[in-house]
Image: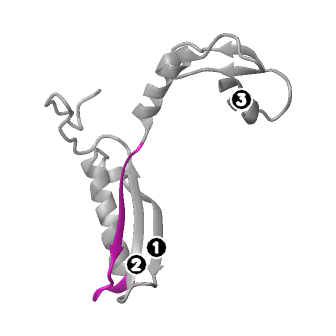
Amino acid sequence: MLADAIDRMKTSKGDRPLIAVGGGSILVPDQIPGVSEVIRPEHFDAANAVGAAIASVSGQVDRIFHPGEGGRQAILDEAREEARERAITAGADPGTVRTIEMEEIPLAYLTSPAIRVRVKAAGALGGVQADVPGGRLFPADRQR
């Protein structure tokens, strides 16, 4: 299966080197058809941990809204704020949270006007922290 997947990713014929990183890379054999060599850089097994450590913390909303007095803009503002609060609750630094995706879909098949709104907000790790398994807290000002 791995050899087939590698062949599908190649942009040209012939054997190519493969760089194996992440915890599961230890399962990659040293010899694979279509691969000239398997390269495992220093600390290859921690690559996924590095990615997780630098990833943004996000929050998202996917709801159906019925326009009220504030209309469309009020709906969008409410959805953006809810996504922002969810990101902060998940541990994002409030000063870094930004809306990164927003989709608005009018629902014409309902008897009253409605809009499905999907919003995703994300920010850097380091805001209000929630309890973690084991009952410990990681305050925002503590170095990890």
Q: Earlier in the sequence, mark 3 or mark 2?
A: 3
Q: Is residue 129 in view from this perspective?
A: yes
Q: Position of residue 55 (x, y in %)?
A: 43, 39
Q: Earlier in the sequence, mark 1 or mark 2?
A: 1
Residue that appears at 68% across and 31% down: 5
Q: CA distance from mark 3 to mark 2?
A: 44 Å
Q: Quadrant of residue 141?
A: top left
Q: Magenta segment, which residues?
A: 56-72
> What residue does disc 2 label?
115
Q: Quadrant of residue 8?
A: top right
Placement of 125 over or under 77, stated as above or below: above
- Name which residue type carries label 2: Ile
Placement of 69 over or under 134, stated as above or below: below
Residue that appears at 77% across and 32% down: 10
Q: Quadrant of residue 30?
A: top right
In the foreground, 70 or 113: 113
Q: Is residue 94 in view from this perspective?
A: no
Residue 104's disc is 1
> What residue does disc 3 label?
4
- Name which residue type carries label 3: Asp
The reply to whether the C-beta atoms of the residues labelled 3 and 2 are less than 8 Å apart is no
The reply to whether the C-beta atoms of the residues labelled 1 and 2 are less than 8 Å apart is yes
- Residue at far right of view: 13
Residue that appears at 55% across and 19% down: 25
Q: Position of residue 79 (x, y in %)?
A: 34, 68
Does the magenta run of residues contain 61? Answer: yes
Mark 3 nearby-residue class (10 Å; few <14, some 14–19, many ≥20):
few
